[in-house]
Amino acid sequence: MSNPTTEQKRKVCLVGDFAVGKTSLTRRFVNNVFSDKYLTTVGVKIDTKVVEVNESQTAKLVVWDIAGESTVTSINENYMKGLAGYLLVADGTRPATIETALHLQQRTEEIFGSLPFVFLLNKNDLETQWAVTDAQEQLLRDKGWKIFLTSAKSGAHVETAFSWLAREVY
Amino acid sequence: MSDASTRQRIPDEAFRHMQRLFIERTHPLYLRFDRDMKLEDWWGDSDYYGFEPLHVGDDADSKVDFLVGVTAQDELELPIVQTPNGQPVSIHVRPEDTGLCVLILDAASEHERQTEIQQKSNEVQLLSKKQQMLMEELKATQIEVDRKRREAEAANRLKSEFISSMSHEFRTPLTSVLGYTEILENTLQNERSQLEKLGAISRGAKHLLSLIENLLDHGRLEDGAIVMQVRPTDLNALLADLRAIFTPLAEKKGLEFSIQTSGLPADRVLLDDMRYRQVLINLVGNAVKFTETGSVVARVHWDNGQLRNEVADTGPGIPEAARERVFLAFQRVNEDQESGAGLGLAISQRIVRIMGGQLVLESSGDEGSEFGFTIDAPIAPDDGDHDPASNREGTVVTASALGHTVLLAEDDDDIAQLVELVLEDAGYRLVRARNGREAVDKALLEKPDLMLMDMNMPVVNGIEAVRELRASGFSSPVIALTASASAAYRESAIAAGCSDYLVKPVDLATLLSTIAEAIADTA
Ligand SMILES: Nc1nc2c(ncn2[C@@H]2O[C@H](COP(=O)(O)OP(=O)(O)OP(=O)(O)O)[C@@H](O)[C@H]2O)c(=O)[nH]1
Ligand SMILES: [Mg+2]
C-alpha cells in the first residue's frame, strides 16, 4: 500500500490538560514561533513537518494538536485513531496537569496499546512559578519514561523531544 | 434505502432547494477510496479546502493528511478538524463494501461557536486556579507571620518571667537585710559611728531594692497586670519627703534644689501615692544625677482635681537623636551613663499613662531639660479610710497583742526569725511552720488568733493551704505574705480565703498595724 516514492508519514498526537502548551509546542516545532496569548484549540489542529530520522532518511510527521481534556473522551479517541506515538504534555507550574497526563497515558495505553511516547514538562522558562520538585521529576523518570523539560517560549528541548519521538515511531 | 423513502414524501423542488442550501453552506467534498485506500472517485469543491490536485489512484496517506493511519474498515466522526490552510471542517468516515467513504463538510460556524465558549471556560478555570494558588500563598505567609509573632511573644514572656523570678529571688534576702538593719538601728540609738555604717547598709539595700522594683514593674507593666492603688494622700507631706530625700544629694553636688508648689489643697487627694512618688523620684533623681552645675526645680501645681508636675534641670540636655527613644525600655541616653538599667523613664511613662496622663519631654537643649505630666488627683472624700497600709506611719504596738498567738508559715529562716523577733517584741506568742502542710496541721492544732502565710512555700503552697484551712472551718484571719505584687495573684489569694495581703519586703510597722487591726476586727 505504501508508495516508495513518497515520504513516509506518521501520525503523532499531543495530549494533555488545557493550556499546558500543546499548541505552542507545535507552533514552535513547525513554524518556530511563539505567542503569549492563549487561544484555545477546539477539536484538533493538524500540522505536518519533515524530520530527519537518520543521516540518509527524512520522514513527514503529521502532528495532531488535540484540544486539552482531562480524560480521553470518545471524540478524542476518534481524533487519535491511527496514531503511531504521542507527546504527553504537562504544565510544570500546575502540578495537577501532571496527574492529568498520567491518567491520559494510562487510558491511551488501554485503548491503543503500548505505543512510543514522550513526557513534556512544559513552561520550564517560568522558574519562579515552577512547582515540580526534583523528587517528583525523578518519580517520572523512575517509570523509565523519556522526560523533557521544555519551553515553547524559549524553544528549549522542543525540537529534541519531537525528534526523539519521530525516531521511535519509524 | 431510507433516502428513497424520504425522497418520496418530499416534493422534488423542495428537495432540490434543500440540496442547494446544504451545498452552499457546507461545501461538501466527498471522497471514495478502494480497499487499498487508493482514491477511486471524488465529488465536490476540493480547492475550497486547499487540497492538492486529486487523481484517481492517489494514495490516501500521501494526499490526505488526516487519513494517515486510517484503514478501510474504520468508522470515524471527527467533528472539528483544522487543516493547515486554517479551514475548520467536520469529517465523517464510513466503511462501505467496496472501500471507504469520506465526507468533508465546512464547520467554520460551529468552530467559532465552540471556541467562544471553550475560551471563556478555560480562562475562568485558569484564573480561579491562579486565585486559589495566591490564596494558599497568602495563607502560608499569614501562618508564618503568626508563628514569628508567637515566637517573639514567647521570647518576651520568657524574658519577663526571668526578670520577675530573679527579682523575687532578690527580694527575700533583702527583706531580711533591711529588717535586721531596722532592728539594729533601734538598738543602737546612741552609737553614732555604728549608726552611720548601718545607714550606709540601709541605703545600699534600699537602692538595690528600688532597682529590683523597677525590673519587676517593667515586667508587670509589660503584661498589663499592674493596678493602681489609689488612696487619700497628703501631698504636702509627700513632697516634704521628696525634699528630704534629694536636698542632701543636691547639696553634695553643689546644685540648687527646690520644690515649688502652688494651689495645693489642704485636704488629702486621691492618687496612688507610691506610684506618684516613684515617678517624681525617678524624674528628680535623673535630673540631679545628670546636672553638674546649676539647679533642679520641681514644680507642682494643683487645680480643680488636676495635678500638674514639671521637673526642670540645667543639665546637658538630651541629644536630638535620642529624644524619641528616651521613653523606651533599656535605653540610656548616653552609653557611658553609669547606673540603672535604663528602665526609669519607660516605667514612669507607663505609670503616668495608667494614671491618665502623659509624660512629655517638654524641652531639651543646652539650657537643660524639662519633663512634665498632669494626672488626676481629686479631693479625697471626707470619711477616714480603713486601708491598713495607709497606717504605715508610726509603730502601733497595741495592748491587744498580749496573749495572742500568731502562726507564721514561712520557709525562709532569716525572715521567720526577723518576724519572730518583731512580733514577740510586740507581745505576741509565735508558732512557726515551714511549709504549707505544716501550716495546715499546726493551724488546726494550735488554733492561732491570726496566721501570717508566705504564699510561695514548698510541699503545699500558701493558696492551697488557705483553701484547705477554710474548708476545715478555720476562721481566724490569714494575712498573705508574698513577693508577687500582681493583682491576679492577690485576687486568687483573697478568693482562697486570705483576709489581707502584704507584699514583701513588708515594712515592719505596717506588718504590726495590719496584724493588730485584723485581730481587732475579729474581736
Ligand atoms: N512562559 C511560557 N508560556 C507558555 C509556554 N507554552 C505555552 N505557554 C502559554 O500558555 C498558554 C497556553 O498555551 P497553549 O499552547 O495554547 O496551550 P494548549 O495546551 O494548546 O491549550 P488548549 O488548546 O486549550 O488545550 C498560552 O498563553 C501560551 O502562551 C512556555 O513554554 N512558556
Ligand atoms: Mg491548543
Image (tube, coloured by chain):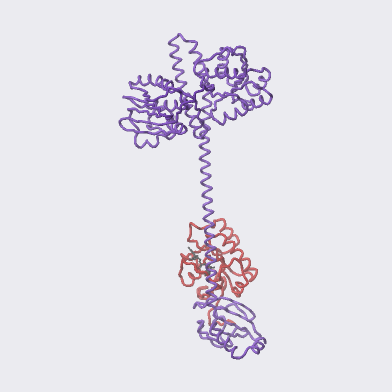
Chain colours: A red, B purple
Which corner quadrant of the image does residue B445 belong to?
top right
Residue B348 is situated, as x and y percent measured from the top left of the image, at: 44, 31
Left or right: B240, with B36 as reference point: left
Q: Residue furthest front?
A: B382
Residue B424 is situated, as x and y percent measured from the top left of the image, at: 58, 13
Quarter in which the C terminus of chain B is drawn: top right
Residue closer to the observer: B124 or B312: B312
Q: Is residue A136 above or below residue B102?
A: above
Residue B363 is situated, as x and y percent measured from the top left of the image, at: 34, 33
Can I make out residue A61 in this image? no
Which corner quadrant of the image does residue A145 belong to?
bottom right
Q: Is residue B195 above or below residue B220?
A: above
Residue closer to the observer: B354 or B446: B354
Q: Is residue A45 above or below residue B262?
A: below
Can I make out residue A152 in this image? yes
Left or right: A121, with B204 as reference point: right
Q: Residue furthest bottom?
A: B12
Which corner quadrant of the image does residue B499 belong to?
top right
Residue closer to the observer: B140 or B19: B19
Q: Residue furthest left?
A: B366
Number of marks in the image? 0
Quarter in which the N terminus of chain B is drawn: bottom right
Q: Residue at x 44, y 32 (%)?
A: B352
Residue B207 is situated, as x and y percent measured from the top left of the image, at: 45, 23
Q: Is residue B371 above or below residue B508?
A: below
